[in-house]
Amino acid sequence: MIRHVYALVIPLILLSGCSEVPGDAAYRSGHKDIAAKYYEDQFNLGSVKAGDRLAQMYSRGDGVPQDYAKAFLIYSELAARGEPLAFHNLGVCYQNGLGTKKDLLKAEQSYRKAADSGVLWAIFNLGTMYSDHLTQKDDDIEGLTLLLRAQRLAKGDSGAEVGIREDRFGTNGGHVAKMRKRMTPQQIALAEEAAKR
């Protein structure tokens, strides 16, 4: 009898609620192990969203053992398919040595690919790399342009997007303030003009 009830409950969990990707309902209802299986199956069938969700679970250790190497492999495969958000996530992995060897040049290149596609977090993270002198070439105008562009694009109400708009991230008042302090008025004007385009 219990086995029959379990057999009925699982499909209901999977079908309940609005699911964008098979496995979302299971994840929301706390059945993360089942969600991970569905995400893996869907990713293997070509679903980008399922792959991203699965990689995020591995990155956080959320319902699966934390495994940055598995997350990195999934992001790499998604990037090979041309997914902009995957390039951002690869940038995070390369910048912090998560699941791969730390490589600031590859982080910069990955962020740039995602930033060129308009991914807010890649634009911001690339700007912070310029702010912290972590890019291959120092270019304060480019760095400030990216940070100002990120501020314009951060329209959401999440704490992170508000933090970008209000320049709360970084030291000494944030990355924008830090860059402005070391730039001439002419350089700042060039960056502000470029950020508007």
Image (cartoon, grey):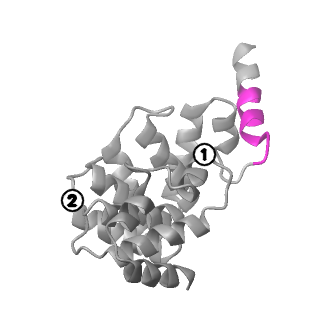
The answer to which of 57 and 91 lies nearer the viewer is 91
108 with respect to 185 (left or right): left
Q: Nearer the viewer, residue 86 or 25?
A: 86
Q: Is mark 1 on a helix, strand or loop?
A: helix
Q: As rendered, which of 6 and 157 lies closer to the eye? A: 157
Magenta residues span: 7-18
- Residue 47 is at least partly visible in this image: no
Q: Position of residue 68 (x, y in %)?
A: 34, 43
Task: Specify the amino acid type for callout 2.
Answer: Asp
Indicate the secondary structure of the residue bearing disc 2: loop
Q: Is residue 39 one of those drawn in magenta?
A: no
Q: Which residue is drawn at 53% across and 65% down?
A: 120
Secondary structure, magenta segment, majority class: helix
User: Where is mark 2, residue-wise?
Assistant: 103
Point out the frontmost of discs 1 and 2: 1
User: Could you say where residue 185 lies in the image, as x and y percent from the top left?
Assistant: 40, 78
| Amino acid identity at mark 1 | Gly
Identity of the residue furthest to the top in this view: 1
